[in-house]
Each structure stands twice: as C-alpha cells, then as structure tokens.
C-alpha cells in the first residue's frame, strides 16, 4: 500500500492498535464516518466513553501531529459552555492516529439546510459566538499591513497568466486585483485585530450537539491570522446553504451579532472580504461541483458590495 493513501483494512488495523494502546481491554467495533483516503474517521463502539478515532496516511504525519496538538490546545481553552472542541484522549504519532471525544453532532451545514429560517438564524448567531470564543484566547489589536495580501493576489494572478492556474473570467479577476492595489493607502496601518484562527472553518467543521452545544473540529492552524477569515469562510457557507433566501445582509448581520464588536476599521474589513473572495474565486476549479458553484455565486455577490458585510 502506498503511504499516500489508506485502505479500509489498514485503517481499521491502525485504529484498533491506537484504541488498544489507550484501552487495553477494548474489543468493540468501528463504524466508518466517511470515505477512506488520505485520512479515515471511525466512530468507536464499545469503548469506555464515546469516542472517535482519526487516522492519517504516513505521508501526512506532520499534518496529523499539528492537528492533534492544536485540537488539544483548543479543547483545553474551550472546556465548558456552549462553545467546545472535542478532547484529545490519545495520540499515537507512530501510526499516526488520534482518539478523541465523540460529540455525536450533526454537521452544521446539514443542520442549517434542514431547519426553519427562525431556527437557522439562532444557529448562525451561535456560530458567530463559537468563532468569538475561539479567537478570544489570542485576540489582540494591531495596525493593518496589506502588503502580504496584495503580494498573494499578485502571485495568483501571475500563476494564471503563466498558465499554471485556471481562473475563470481572468480579465475580470485582473481588474479586481488592480482595484485592491488602489485601496492600499486607505487601509494601511488602520486598526485591526489578529488572532490564532481555525483557518478552514467551513460549515462541515462545526458540529451541532444534541444539547445545542457547538463543537469545532479539524484544527491545524496554530499561527496568528486575520480573524475575519473564519467569519468569511463560514459566512460563505451560510449564504450558500442556509434558508435565508435573498436576505444575505440579514444572514451576515446575524453571524456578526453572534461574534460581537470588532475593533477592525470598516475599510480593512472591506479589503479583507474582497481579498478572501478573490482567493476563493482563484481556487474554484473550472469543472466546479454544485457546492463550489454555490460558494462562487456568493463570492460574486461579496465582490459587488461597497461596504463591509462581515
């Protein structure tokens, strides 16, 4: 077997080894929670406490270590209340495998798409509160530095123009990038905030527990970043899949209400929401899935806005 991917038999063997290291008398069963590939996730049946085990292929050893370390940090910081992260019960770096608390939650996107608008609004506000709780552990104020963001956009554009990246409607993308450079003086050194973020907070990485607790999963980033990135990535999913109809401003206002007051200048937030929208646009493949197309439609709407919507 290549170390680039797992197969079901190897994944189950490694999961069993990790569980036996934690609970020597364990003799239960494993319930697959998704397709097996570079990683695999199983619900553990017959364990002393509800648990899930996640495996990675050997090639992703560093990624596994980073995820286990960061999840353990966040779980310690968010141990009580409605905003949580699953405890890491055991990490075997040789397999690599992580046994963690099973929160038995419904994916946030599934919860949103299956409820009435009033309930969806409550959930979106709660999600804003979860993001705020995560950021509160490291939040600080700082002057905004747009150079790195502009350099990143220039790199994406250069890749597309060299044929190394496919970006749909490249002339329009180029025009938006030029407009971002024109914002430089308006946002440079304006007040903003920094925090250690999730950095991949799509609606699949929040789980709604049966008691209403929100659980975050799939942590890895341990570096300081733009807090608005988490609001943006989750907000795009909210706009794409929640039952808010065309009332997009209301949906994002609900997310912002849950997050609370921001110290960032509105011009900085406008700059960042456009930057992240362009990044999502550049990452959307030419043969986009239905989900990717829905997110791209939201991105187009965000780029049309003349003021901060997050």
Image: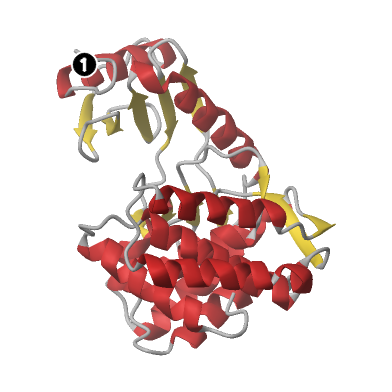
**Does 243 sit above or below residue 241?**
below
Q: Is residue 263 visible?
A: no
Residue 71: % across, % down: 55, 36
Residue 52: % across, % down: 36, 33
Residue placed under numbered mark 1 in the picture? 10
Q: Is residue 296 visible?
A: yes
Q: Which quadrant is the N terminus positioned in?
A: top left
The furthest residue to the front: 162
Q: How many marks?
A: 1
Q: Is residue 280 left or right of residue 188?
A: left
Q: Is residue 125 left or right of residue 138?
A: left
Image quadrant in which you'd find residue 133: bottom right
Image quadrant in which you'd find residue 147: bottom right
The one nearer the camera, 89 or 306, is: 306
**Does 207 sit above or below residue 3?**
below
Which residue occupies 37% across, 36% down? 50
Secondary structure beneath dot 1 equals helix
Q: Is residue 188 left or right of residue 304?
A: right
Which of the colour schemes (rainbow, by chain, secondary structure, one colour) is used?
A: secondary structure
Q: Which quadrant is the C terminus positioned in?
A: bottom right
The one nearer the camera, 223 or 71, is: 223
Which residue occupies 48% across, 20% down? 91
Q: Residues within 10 Å of mark 1 (few under 14, many from 20)?
A: some
Residue 208: % across, % down: 41, 58
Which residue occupies 43% across, 16% down? 22
Residue 168: % across, % down: 32, 64
Which residue occupies 62% across, 79% down? 308
């Amino acid at each position: 077997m290549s170390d680039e991917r797992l197969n079901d038999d190897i994944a189950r063997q490694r999961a069993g080894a990790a569980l036996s290291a934690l609970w020597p008398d364990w003799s239960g069963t494993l319930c697959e929670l998704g397709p097996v590939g570079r990683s695999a996730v199983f619900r553990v049946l017959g364990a002393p406490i509800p648990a899930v085990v996640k495996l990675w292929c050997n090639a992703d050893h560093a990624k596994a270590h980073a995820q286990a370390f960061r999840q353990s940090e966040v779980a310690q910081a968010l141990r009580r209340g409605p905003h949580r992260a699953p405890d890491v019960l055991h990490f075997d770096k040789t397999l690599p495998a992580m046994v963690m608390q099973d929160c038995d939650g419904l994916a946030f996107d599934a919860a949103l798409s299956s409820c009435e608008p009033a309930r969806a609004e409550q959930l979106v506000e709660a999600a804003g509160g979860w993001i705020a709780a995560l950021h509160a552990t490291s939040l600080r104020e700082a002057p905004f530095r747009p150079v790195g963001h502009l350099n990143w956009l220039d790199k994406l554009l250069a890749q597309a123009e060299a044929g190394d990246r496919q970006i749909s409607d490249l002339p329009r993308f180029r025009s938006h990038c030029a407009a971002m450079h024109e914002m430089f003086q308006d946002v440079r050194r304006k007040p903003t905030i920094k925090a250690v973020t999730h950095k991949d907070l799509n609606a699949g990485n929040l789980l709604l527990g049966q008691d209403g607790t929100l659980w975050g999963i799939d942590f890895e980033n341990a570096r300081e970043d733009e807090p608005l990135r988490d609001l943006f990535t989750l907000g795009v999913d909210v706009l794409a899949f929640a039952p808010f109809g065309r009332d997009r401003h209301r949906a994002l206002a609900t997310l912002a209400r849950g997050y609370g007051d921001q110290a960032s200048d509105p011009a900085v937030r406008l700059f960042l929401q456009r930057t992240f929208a362009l990044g999502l646009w550049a990452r959307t493949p030419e043969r986009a899935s239905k989900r990717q197309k829905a997110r791209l439609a939201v991105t187009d709407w965000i780029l049309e806005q003349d003021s901060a919507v997050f």
